[in-house]
Every structure is written in structure tokens, then in C-alpha cells.
Image (cartoon, helix red, strand yellow):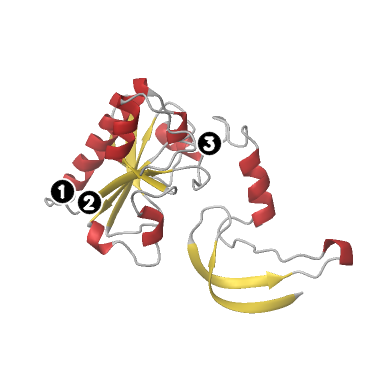
């Protein structure tokens, strides 16, 4: 196996820009390919692509966010919670304050939402802002709230990203949180689409 040095690489599963190595794997001639292995997730791009094609790849039984919302993950501290949702810190923060808000009910992604879910999205945003206020954040103009859209999601359980200050999002991760892209939809734009009855499936938030 030939090892090629690389200053940065992107994890095939969690899409995190990580320091590490790219491995060039020599297989039989008919199967020769380059495979990028994820140190943090232990899978290859090919395996992740296969997972993405399977609609049942993440069930409620093995969903880490379902475990967290039910208080079954000993490593995650809930900073806010109610009967419908919980809030906790992102384990790979892109800003000084980076929280995730998830519903207790298993919903795959923002593409699964319809008009009836608009109140849920609003409540998730309200909890996110409350978590920021708990941390002493007062400038609500310098925050960013939004959802990643498939296929740019790492966990198939709806989660709202709450970041502050938005002006201090890590430059190496900023591309993940740019509004009006196919990757990231802001909470305001998602609510606008839902309230208008427009499907979010396969749609850019322009």
C-alpha cells in the first residue's frame, strides 16, 4: 500500500475537513481504485455512497440522535430539553458556540417536512436561540440557524445547527453553512417554504 501525504482530507461520512492521510490502495488490476479512509468514521467513500442510496440505512433502533434524545447516550450533555426536543453541543463545533437541536420523534431530514411541521421548526429555532442566550449571546443578528440538506447530512435524523457568532465560523468549515445553497437552508427560508406549501425535496433555497 502506497501512502500519499495530504495536509487535509474530507471525511466520507461526516464531511468534516480533517488533517490526515490519503491511502492509495493497490488492488487486482480490474479493481484498482483510490479509496479515502475516514479516521473518525472508519468507512470509505464507496461504503458511504452505498449507505446514501439506501433509504433504510439509519433506523430508529440504531440512530445516535434517537439515543441522545432519549437520554441513552452517556457522553452527551443536554443543555436544554422539553417533551418534544432536546439541545446539545455539536462534537465538532464550527463556531465558539455550536449547538444542535433535534426532535425526539425520528424525522429523517428537512426534505421529509411538510407544512404541518412548520411549528416544530419554529420551536426548534426558539430553543436554539434560548441556548445561545444561556451562553450570554445577546447579538441575535450575528448568529446562524439552519439545516443541511440531503445528501449533505451526516445523521439521518432532523437536526438544526445553531452557531454564534456567525462572523467567527471557522473558515475551514464555513462552506458548510452558506445560506442559499443546495447544502444548507436557513431556518427562515425553510419556514417560508413550508408555510407556502412548497416541497423541500430536491430544492435549493434560492
User: Which image quadrant for residue 4?
Assistant: bottom right
Q: Residue furthest bottom?
A: 5
What is the spatial separation of the Cα atoms under label 2 and label 1, in whole angstroms?
6 Å
CA neighbours of label 1 inside 10 A, class few (<14), some (14 to 19), many (20+): few
Task: Label 1, secondary structure: give it.
Answer: loop
Nearer-the-camera pick, 203 or 73: 203
Task: Label 2, secondary structure: give it.
Answer: loop
Q: Which residue matches tag 3?
A: 63
Q: Residue furthest left?
A: 138
- x 26%, y 37%: residue: 125
What is the spatial separation of the Cα atoms under label 3 and label 2, in whole angstroms?
28 Å
Dot 1 or dot 3: first in sequence order is 3
- x 28%, y 25%: residue: 119
Q: Residue furthest right?
A: 29
Q: Which residue matches tag 1?
A: 140
Please say if 171 is above or below 60: below
Residue 64, x across and y down, in percent:
50, 39
Residue 15, x across and y down, in percent:
51, 56
Circles 2 and 1: CB distance less than 8 Å? yes
Amino acid at each position: 500500500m502506497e501512502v500519499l501525504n495530504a495536509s487535509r482530507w474530507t471525511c466520507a461520512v461526516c464531511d468534516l475537513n480533517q488533517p490526515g492521510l490519503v491511502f492509495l490502495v493497490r488492488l487486482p488490476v480490474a479493481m484498482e481504485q483510490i479509496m479515502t479512509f475516514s479516521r473518525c468514521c472508519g468507512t470509505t467513500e464507496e461504503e458511504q455512497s452505498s449507505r446514501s442510496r439506501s433509504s433504510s440505512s439509519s433506523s430508529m433502533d440504531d440512530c445516535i440522535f434517537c439515543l441522545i434524545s432519549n437520554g441513552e447516550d452517556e457522553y452527551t450533555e443536554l443543555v436544554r430539553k422539553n417533551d418534544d426536543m432536546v439541545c446539545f453541543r455539536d462534537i465538532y463545533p464550527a463556531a465558539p458556540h455550536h449547538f444542535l437541536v433535534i426532535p425526539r420523534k425520528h424525522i429523517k431530514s428537512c426534505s421529509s417536512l411538510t407544512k404541518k411541521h412548520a411549528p416544530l421548526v419554529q420551536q426548534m429555532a426558539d430553543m436554539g436561540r434560548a441556548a445561545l442566550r444561556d451562553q450570554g449571546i445577546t447579538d441575535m443578528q450575528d448568529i446562524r440557524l439552519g439545516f443541511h440538506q440531503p445528501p449533505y447530512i451526516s445523521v439521518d435524523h432532523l437536526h438544526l445547527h445553531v452557531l454564534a457568532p456567525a462572523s467567527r465560523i471557522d473558515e475551514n468549515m464555513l462552506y458548510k453553512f452558506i445560506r442559499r445553497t443546495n447544502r444548507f437552508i436557513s431556518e427562515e427560508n425553510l419556514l417560508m417554504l413550508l408555510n407556502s406549501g412548497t416541497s423541500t425535496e430536491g430544492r435549493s433555497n434560492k
